[in-house]
Structure formats: C-alpha cells, structure tokens
Amino acid sequence: MARIPAIKRRKLTPPATDGDDSSPSTLEPETETSAFFKQASGWNLEQDYESRPRKGGKKEKENTRLPIKTSDGLVQQVDHNEEAQDAESDLEWLGAEESEEAVEEQVVKKPQVPMRQQILEAKEEMARIALLLNEDPEENIGAFKTLTQFGQSDNTTIKKLALATQLAVYKDVIPGYRIRPLSEEDMEVKVSKEVRKLRAYEQALVGGYQSYIRDLAKLAQSGRGGTSRDGGPSLGSVAISCACALLVAVPHFNFRGDLLKILVGKLSNRKVDADFIKCRETIEKVFQNDEDGTPSLDAVSILTKMMKARGYRFDESVLNTFLHLRLLSEFSWKASTNHIDRPSKDDGGFEGKRLKEKRVFRTKKERKLMKERKVIEKEMKQADATVGHEERDRMQAETLKLVFVTYFRILKLRSPNLMGAVLEGLARYAHLINQDFFGDLLEALKDLIGHAESGDDLEEEQEEDEETTRNLTREALLCIITAFALLEGQDAAKAQATLSLDLSFFITHLYRTLHALSLNPDIELSAKSLHLPDPNAPVTTNNKVNIQTTTVLLLRSLSSVLTPALAARAVPPLRIAAFTKQLMTSSLQLPEKSCIAMIGLLGRITKTHEKKIAALWNTEERRGDGMFDALGGEVEDNNPFAATIWEGEILRKHFSPAVRDGVKVVEKNVLGLR
C-alpha cells in the first residue's frame, strides 16, 4: 500500500531568527499562527473595505527602485518611508558629532548676498521707484509706501539713501496748495471718477509724507550729530538736513509745524555745531522768504514757547533770528506786548465804515448786483489762494506781539548772555513800539544802565556763571540808541509832551563814558574781527550780538543826541558845546579810523550849529566866566563856554591826511566859509 505524502503548510509570518539559519522546522507548534487564523475567520473584509476613507483620486508617487529579496526568500518592494527611517537610524548610529557637522554644512550652503551688493540693489530699486513717481505719481500711489519700507531697513546706508530719495520725490510731487483732510460729508458726496482718483492720490501723498516726517523727527531726536562709522554724516544729521530742505522748499504744505519742531528742538541746545547752524540759517530763510506771514507766525510761536520752557537759557544767536523778519521793513503798525494800534484810513490802514455823506446812491437792483459781485470776488480769492494785505498785516501784528513779549521778559530777567541781543533787537524794532509801551521800556533801560554803572550785574553774573561775561559798555550804548529810536517816529514826537519822556539820564551817561571809550583798545574790533586777546585782560567770550563795532554804536548814540532827525536845531547850546569839547579831546586818543569818523561827525555838528559853538574856537568871543570842568558828571554844570578848542591845532598835525582834511572842514564850518 502506497504512503500518502504529508500536506505542506506555508508560513505567513515567519518568526524572527537569530543567526544565519533562516529555515526553521515546520514541525514545531505554531500557537501564534493558529490564533491569527481563528481571528481572521471572523473578519468582514468587504465591510472594512467599504468603510475605508477614499484618497480622493490622489496618485501615489511612482517608485523607481528595484525589488529586493529578503532572508526568507520573499521578493519585496522597498518604500521611500522605510528608506528615510533607515537613514535616520544610520544618523543615530553614527553619533552626534557627524550630525552636527551635517547641520553646519547645511548652514554654509545657504547663499549670502554681500553688503555692497545689497546697497547697490536697493539704490537701483529706489531710483526706479522715484522715476515712476516723477513720471506719473497718480498711477503709482503705492510707491510712497514702498519707499517708506526702505527707510525701515537695518542697514544705515540704505536708510540714508531712502531718506534722501523721499526728500527728492516729495519736493517734486508736492503741489502748490495745502491738502485738507476729507470729512465724512465729503466722503458721502458722489463725485466723478477723476475727482475720486485725485482724492485717493492726495490722501496717499499726505499719508506717506506724514510717516516720512515722523521718521525724520524720531531720527533727529534720537540720532547724534557728527559722522557715522562709514565716514559720512550720521542719521541724525541727515534727518535734520532733510527737514531743513523741506521747510525751505515747501513751507506752505501740511505738517509745517512738525518740521519747525524738529528745527527748534535742535536750537534749544546750547551746543553750537554744524546742525545747529543749519537749523538757524533755515529759520532765517523762512523769515526772509515769507510773503503771507503765516509761516513766520508759526515759527515765532514755537520759538517763544521753547524759550520760555528753557527758562531763557539758550544761545543768543537764536534770538537774533527775529532780526530777519520781513515785518521790520514791511509792517507799519505800532504794537506792544498786548495791544496793536491799527492805523486809520487816512494813514493807509483799513477802510472803516463809510460816512453817510460819502456813500453813493444806488438803486436796489444795483446794490443786489454789487453784493453778488462781492461774493464772487471772495470766492475767486479763496480759489486762487491769494493772501491779501489785510491778512498779512494781521499775521505780522500777532508776530510782533510775541517778539515784544519775549524781549521784555528777558529784559526784566536781565539774562547775562541775552542782554546784548535783546537790546539790539529793541533798537531795530523801536519804530514799531506802541506809545503805551514807552514808559515801561524806558524804566527798564534806565534800570539796566544803573546796574551797569554800579557793577551789580557783573557781580551777580560771576556768582551765577563764571563762563559767560557781558560787555556792559556795549549794552549801555544799545540802551541809549533804543531810547532815542523811540522818538524818531512822528507819533512819538507828538506824544513826547503827554508821556513826559525825559531822556536826560541817557544823555548824562553817554557824556560820562566818552573819555573811557576813547581809551578802549578794542573800540574798533567787532565780534568777527581777527585779533589776539590781551593776556593780562580777564577771560571774555566773543560778542555775537552783531558785527557793529563799539565805534559805530558810539557814533549812532551821538547822532541821536546831537543831530536828531526831528528838531535838530532845538538842541540846547550848552549840550552841543559840552559834547563838542569832549569829542575833540577824545579824538586825540582814538585810533585812525575812529578818529576820522569822529571828525566827520563834528563836521556835521558844526555845519548845523555853527553859530552856537563858534565861541569855542575864538578866545575873544568867550561867553562864559570861570573854569571848564572836564571831569564833571553833568552836561550843563561843566561851563563849556569857558573852554577853548585847542585840540584842533594838534589834530592839524595828525599823521593821517583824512584827519587833517576833516579838521580843516570843521574850522571852515565854524567860520562860515562853506
């Protein structure tokens, strides 16, 4: 009987083997396999396949790898996931050192753009954007925001280029009018497509310009002046330069106050550097080029607020910017710290209400037509953005009030480093000072001269600040010039009797200081004169009030006292004789140029008052008895007619031909041989 062969069973999941033997015996019991088949009998494969989620028709990535044969003799296909897991296990097996090296290699492989290349690319891109904005800004309103993003770069050079590019763009595209913000009512009104497009462009322009000015203010406030690491100007200096250029180029446009605050913030520092000088010169240009008066009013308002907040401790050159205001030559009203005298119609002022007899008879229809014409003319003026003389005068009047308030406060405080600038300003603005302001101003000037004579101000100054010094002689001369300049106008001359303006105090002080001034070695030196200081003299700072020398101030004072513009022949003979004698004596000690100027002044005096002082040159016609007191302090008590002008004989032999000729002219005037 033949033997029946045994049934061969195939293993579905061969167990893990240790060693090289990969063919285990089939006769060993397989508990795991039998359990697997018992569970598989209860599976519902169709239901499981039906409930399996669909993949959405996504195609699996084609595997291009060849199949491999396992240790069991089975042929299998290797997936990508298995390969990635094998690679990770290999990295773990290699250790941490090789993994760190691989990471470093990956970092090095990233491309890096050189800094020079970045700057070049940014420059080209900004040039392209600027060209687009110059060609058609309304079609490229998004370019304003792009330029602003360049300004936020971490690279200092790119940021400087962005600031300069925005400056050039805004100077070209800013219109000649001020853009007002749109209200809700304006947004609701239906407009045409062109108007809507223009509004969008204007709002984008204003928004970009505002963000640009904010960046300038932030950089100017936080950045330091001088030079940066790359050898060029720092970001703060570039921001200040851009603000100055914008204020000069477009002073009429929006956010003028923000630009002025940037400049005034720099001027509030007492350290004078290149940026400080640039801001000061920009303010002066704004004052000189202002036609309607509004920019000047804004600048003066911000400057006065800064001065008050700083306690009037700032550089005196900032106060001298008020001397560049156009109202000095254009304005004709009188003002004080709190009042403006508007001229009447006869004086060229505003037209008041017409009197009944001057009105022209018109019918009702004519009056209606005239009223309609006035409305149309008013609208045309507003459309043309023209500023009339009335509006300009009103702006300049408000500006003048602020200037006088600042001057008078500093005059009361007697700030050491600002007194010269204040007195020079009052001397220049004297013809615009209101009559109600005369009394207080003259009392302040008298008080200042009295303290200068006693030396109280000098002692207080040395106690407060040892570095700052004052030229009291120069300040006294400026006080005299200011006091007499108040009377140069016709209105002031008319009010002299009612106001009881007594200027004898200033005349006496000037008479007492003539000998001391003639012996001053620096009488011909100004603040800008190049000279070596006296090593034995006390340390003094340069006078920066103005460029006029002490000789010029002295001649201005003497001209106001002896040959005033009004009533020159009404000067008392005793005053003329006393000053003439003292001036001839002082001319012997003066330097050449000052002596020539003094002899010229004496020539004008003798030409006007030749009969009053002719006795001084002729001993036989002396009017007075007794002796002349050359060192007396009072003008009228020195008995000048008892003296003789003997100094003329010495001046005839002066080494300067101009002095000798001047003396001959004086003698001819006295003898009446003109």
Image (spheres, grey):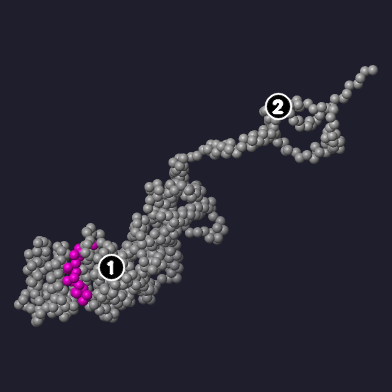
- Amino acid type at image mark 2: Pro
Question: Is any atom of residue 464 visible in this view?
Answer: yes
Task: Give the number of callouts.
Answer: 2
Of all residues, the one furthest to the top in this rendering is: 1
| Residue holding disc 1 | 470
Label 1 packing within 10 angstroms: few (<14), some (14-19), many (20+): many
Question: Is any atom of residue 400 visible in this view?
Answer: no
Instruction: Give the extent of the magenta segment.
Output: 508-526
- 635 or 19, nearer to the observer: 19
Residue 31 x, y percent position in the rendering: 84, 34
**Residue in the picture at 20% in, 72% down:** 513
User: Is 247 left, or right, of 485 in this rendering?
Assistant: right
Relative height, residue 200 to residue 3 (above, below): below
Q: Which mark is residue 67?
A: 2
User: Is 642 left, or right, of 73 in this rendering?
Assistant: left
Q: Quadrant of residue 560?
A: bottom left
Of all residues, the one furthest to the left in this rendering is: 620
Residue 575 x, y percent position in the rendering: 17, 76
Decide which of tag 1 and tag 2 comes sooner along the chain: 2
**Residue in the picture at 13% in, 78% down:** 629
- Amino acid type at image mark 1: Arg
Residue 267 x, y percent position in the rendering: 37, 61
Q: Quadrant of residue 374?
A: bottom left
**Residue in the picture at 78% in, 30% down:** 14
**Residue in the picture at 66% in, 36% down:** 89
Of all residues, the one furthest to the bottom in this rendering is: 625
User: Is 32 left, or right, of 363 in this rendering?
Assistant: right
Q: Which mark is residue 588?
A: none
User: Is 416 left, or right, of 152 in this rendering?
Assistant: left
Q: Is residue 511 magenta?
A: yes
Instruction: Find the distance from the CA under tag 1 to the CA under tag 2.
Output: 103 Å
